[in-house]
Amino acid sequence: MNRRAEPSLNVVPQIMILLGIVMVAFIWTLFLVQSAASRDDALQAQRSENSNLALIISESLKQMTDRARAMASLAGDELAGTSSRSARLLTLLAEDPVFNRLSIYEPNGNLRYSSHPDSARTSIGPWLSDLADHTAKHGYTPVLPSRRLDPAMAPGQTAWRLPFLVPEGKPGNGRVDRWILVELDIGYLSGLLQHVNLGYGGFLQILDGEKNEWMRADTLGVMVGGKPVKGLFFASSNRVNSGAGSFELSGKRHQYVYANRSPNNFTVVVAQPEEQILAAALGKQNQQLVLNVLMTLLVAGIVVWLVRTLRQQQLALKALQKSERRNQNLIERLEGEHARTTRAASIDHLSGLYNRRQFLDVAAQALASQRRQRRLSALLFIDLDRFKSINDSLGHHIGDLLLQAVAGRIQHRLGDEDLAGRFGGDEFVVFMGGNRTEVDIEKWVSGLVEHLSAPYQLDGSELNSSPSVGIAISPRDGQSIDDLLRGADAAMYSAKRAGRGQYRFFDQSLNSNSDIEEFHLEQAFADALRERQFVLHYQPQVCLDSMEIVGYETLVRWQHPDYGLLFPDRFIPMAERSGFVVPLGMEVIRLACEQLVEWQQQGLKAHPLAVNVSPIQLSEPGFCDRVRAEMERHGLAQDMLELEVTETAVLDEQAMENLNCLNDAGIRLSLDDFGTGYSGLAHLESVPVGKLKIDRSLISRICNSHDDSPVVSSTIILAKRMNLKVVAEGVETPEQLVHLKVAGCDIAQGYHLSRPIPAADVPHFHATFNRLQETG
């Protein structure tokens, strides 16, 4: 329980740090959002204030233009009289603080009268041409003329008077009778701004319709020599328009608002630097920044303190747990010593499983319990294939390691009510209890066989082995452990005869029929050789690069007069035990040579034939000479025959002598069933073989993925480096064929390409296969 709690305690500091980070992120996100909102509010507030100011000034100028119209009308009437009335007009202008000059012009723009003739414009023709369309559109409205076309002002010169042109004419006439030019005192206008707070850098502009500046002033008065303002944009219509925008001036961002009066041809602009507008907000923002920094430091300090406190508690807890584990280990050691002393007499010292005596006792009790509960029970008898050869060739150390590995894999798959034991040597037994059906039992046994057939990594090298399993079920096959053992043992021998890595259920026919059949076969073997009852079937070998047939493997069959066609697993083991395998091997070589000669006589393209050679046959003195004599007798080239030897053959000195003799004679040699034995690639350096045949048990593991069988891929790579061709046996699916071709395998054979076929079917198959390749 403490061990489960320890990981959760380790997570707590991380959670605290994460919460601290989230809190700090929230504080600073809120600060950024509030800062942005405060900035926008400050700019909006100042924009509204300046907009009101621009509208007020615009309206004031409008009113001044209305006064200018009235004064212009008065001036026209006054000038129609005597010179004394002209003097009185001058007096009125002198008393008015806004209007300080007045001039009257003919419709063609020539000067008719001026209150200050010395500085008056003699002609306003350029203005009249520019204002023709404006007057036609807006009528007799006072307008601010273009600064650019002013005949009295040079470019860049500061204007001190703001001119307004007032057209006059009779209503309905549509013709201007005269133009009255009224000039406003800019100094007076700028003085009105002294009580308006535009801030440092803020200013006011009065622009004509072309955005030319007539006046620029701030709270100190008229601004002289200011840099031109660019980037202004105004909306215009027949009414007063207002708006806002921004521009760059002297490297500073300015916000401006405007009030545009298109009928009067002027625009009032109020501009302020944004930094001036935001100064107050920036001060509050700095205060908030300092507060946020303090809050961040506070949160960080709290998190650090909490983490340190939690870690101190964790250290104390770990110390307590360590002490508890130490005490528990002492208790477990004492209990283990006691258990070892009590189990020493009942446990197999090598495998850790029950020994024979103890297994029989506990299995008998478990069987009685299963019978009382009316449940099926099963007894498995397991024997390792080729264990004696492994033990003899690689030593007892490797054999013991293999037995331990097998015992471990069996224990790994046992259920709560299952038992396992080792009877000695490579014999294991398993009692299956629990509530299982026969289907469940078979499924479990199938998984066990597959698990025990997987490669073993022993003392730095890979070893392949497989089990043969016999199964007896209670109560069908017996009511006692002894009965079940006899049935499982008989079923195990039946599995061995079926091949490596097989399992069989006990059947009553296994009690005697199989032994009788084997006896009859052994008695008839000599007659079968004499009467030539053995025949050959041929399985094609296909080159993966060209997909052409490059040879055939010969597979012997016994055409028995009573039992029919028998496959090798029915008579080869018996032939090896009885010694008939040597004459059988020479019979197969003779049949292969005769078939090659027959195909050549029929005009068929002859391909090399591969013949399996038994290790017993290969270890016979003079075997090489007999093979060479047989080929010479049939007049065959030496390379038309290929002998396949197993890995066990390379361990015999006489066998190696025969192999070197055959190789010197030009007869091809290949190493068969590679990957199922124990010689490894190290022995290949001393064996004169030209091909390496990978066993079907390794090929069968290849499915769809490129890494299904790294053993196969590695074997191909190493064989290529040793200049060996690689043949894959047992190719049964297109995926296996593709994988082998990509991995660099040279030749493949198996049911996917063709099953073994009789000699009479070979020509037809050969022609059909070639035709499929040409059309495919």
Image: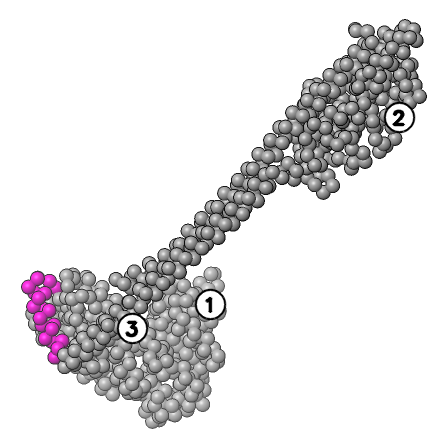
Ranked by sequence position, the earlier of labels 1 and 3 is 3
510 with respect to 265 (left or right): left
Q: CA distance from mark 1 to mark 2?
A: 95 Å
Image coordinates of residue 629 in percent, x first then y, are 38, 90
Q: Which mark is residue 453?
A: 3
Q: Main secondary structure of the magenta part?
A: helix
Mark whose residue sits in front, 1 or 2: 2
Q: Is residue 88 visible?
A: yes
Examine the rendered structure and indicate whether residue 152 appears above or below residue 385: above
Image coordinates of residue 128 in percent, x first then y, are 85, 19
Examine the rendered structure and indicate whether residue 333 appears above or below residue 19: below
Q: Which mark is residue 742?
A: 1
Image coordinates of residue 529 in percent, x first then y, are 26, 84
Image coordinates of residue 649 in percent, x first then y, are 34, 86
Q: Residue at x 10, y 69 (%)?
A: 366
The residue nearer to you, when weighing 181 against 541, is 181
For residue 694, which quarter of the picture?
bottom left
Q: Residue at x 45, y 48 (%)?
A: 23
Looking at the picture, which amino acid does disc 2 mark?
A: Ala
Instruction: Classify mark 1: helix, strand or loop.
Output: helix
The residue nearer to you, when weighing 212 against 501, is 212
Q: Quadrant of the N terminus?
A: bottom left
Looking at the picture, which amino acid does disc 3 mark?
A: Ser
Q: Residue at x 37, y 70 (%)?
A: 699
Q: Residue at x 74, y 29 (%)?
A: 205
**Mark 2 Cα shell of 10 Å, populated few (<14), some (14-19), many (≥20):** few
Ranked by sequence position, the earlier of labels 2 and 3 is 2
Q: Which mark is residue 152?
A: 2
Q: Which mark is residue 760?
A: none
Residue 365 lies within the magenta run: yes
Task: Give the residues drawn in magenta, as a range.
Answer: 357-376
